[in-house]
Image: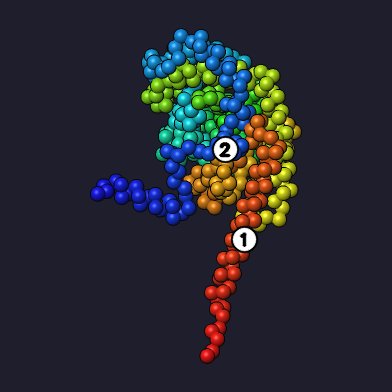
Amino acid sequence: MSSPLDRMIDKVLDARRGMSIGCPDLHQPMPTTAPDLFSNDCLSVTTSPRARDAFLKRVTHMLFVFGSGGSRLLTGNQDTHTDFFGGLGCIASTAALFNSGYDANLAFWSTIPQKGDAVVFDEFVHASTRDGMAASPLKSLGALYAFKHNSVPSFRERVQQVLEAYPNIANGQGMLFVAVETLYSMEGDYAPLLQLLDAVDELIPKGCAHVMVDEAHTSSLFGPDGRGLLWALGLQGRGWGMSGGNSGDLDLTSCLEVSRTVLYSRPLLYTTSLPHAHICGLNTVFDYLASPDSTALRNRLRKVCNYFEHILETAPRHVPPNLLSLLHREIPADYPSKVFSPIFPLIKFLRPLGYAVTAIPYPTVPRGKEQIRVVLHAGNTEEELDEFVTRLLQWVTMMEADEERRQDAREEDAHPPERAKL
């Protein structure tokens, strides 16, 4: 006999199915027979024999491999962890290490902004940023202001509203925080960072604005040794970044903010630190990103992206947009020509074609924007991309044929043939 809890869960799941929202079975592994066009491993590091060998060589010389010792604020801040920060001097003077990008955003946004401050954020920032802001004192004070995605005029309008509502910020007694991402994973487009930062410099008193840039999808792909898009654009001194690698995430910010985050953020207080083996993996990844191999992979990935975008623009020209279409993406005009997007969102769900594809449903994206997301990798070949597009077009042909059969059936029902008279 089912319990009230079971019945409630069944009701919720049935409602999701009724709205065509998937209920994935995490006990079933993703298929791996087709080429990888969906994971976040853009530089194909996880399949690199050199990276694997470097990790195994490094881990065999470690005194501790398993476990972490506890919370970072208790017994989990050991030599393995402190030595890791010593290797980050070329990237940032101070940093906080979190177990995931979600934890990093949650920790920063829930602890740093205080009463008298305000936040202006892109409407499409990640859920972790939204959850962090919701846990901050600013939520109940109504000090969170969303601006239209990648719209500089909307951003400027929101900043003006903040300055009117919070004159202490205009007087240099409060902080305006800005939350944006470099590359938005569901849209595949870039933030106009230079224009946003110019607006901040123009409108906000010096030292009273703090721009946090989530580099989850651009760290390792751009800048010297893959340090990120802020470095590639020469903005590393004007905005603070969050970047990940392996299973951890770095919050690159000021020393005082790191101290406050460490002392007050629940994701650090109540979570064991990353295991020693994970830190070993992070060190291996950072070394690999600074190697000639990684530079070659970044160049290769740019070529793969350009090729795939070309065939996507030419092959499905006559495909009805209700079956298959590309979301409009933009790269700001003031970005270098070498900046590319490895994320190509597609509108329809093509799981039966044998690829490890999953739907991106509501509430991850707005209603009506459900999609699948293709992520290109340095290890992908032109032949794999050609085959994938061919499969897409085959699926479109199948869907069109199904629609024709349904239309014929509807017409037949509307005009049934007359029976012969005896």
Q: In which quarter of the image is residue 42?
A: top right
| Residue 310 visible, this orientation | yes
Residue at left offset 64%, top offset 33%: 377
Question: x and y percent of residue 163 in the render?
Answer: 55, 37
In the shown orientation, is residue 291 left or right of residue 358? right
Three-letter amino acid code at disc 2?
A: Thr
Q: In this view, does 242 lie above or below 413?
A: above
Q: Distance between the residues labelled 2 and 1?
A: 27 Å
Q: Tell me where residue 353 appears, x and y as whole percent.
A: 58, 46
Image coords of residue 358 (percent x, y): 53, 43
Q: Is residue 122 visible?
A: no
Residue lying farthest to the bottom in this orientation: 422
Work out whether residue 269 or residue 162 is closer to the camera in this orientation and state it: 269
Give whichever of 247, 170 is nearer the camera. 247
Q: Which residue lies furthest to the front in this view?
A: 422
Q: Give me the residue at 43% from left, 42% from top.
A: 25
Q: Is residue 355 above or below residue 414?
A: above
- Per the image, label 2 sits on a secondary structure element best described as loop
Residue at horizontal 37%, vertical 50%?
A: 12
Question: Looking at this view, is 204 or 171 the one in front?
Answer: 204
Dot 1: what SS?
helix
Residue 385 image position (x, y, % from top left) = 68, 40
Which residue does the image show at 68% across and 26% down from the upper left?
Answer: 297
For residue 28, which numbered disc appears in the image?
none
Q: Name the residue under label 2.
A: 33
Residue 151, placed above or below residue 40: below
Residue underneath mark 1: 401
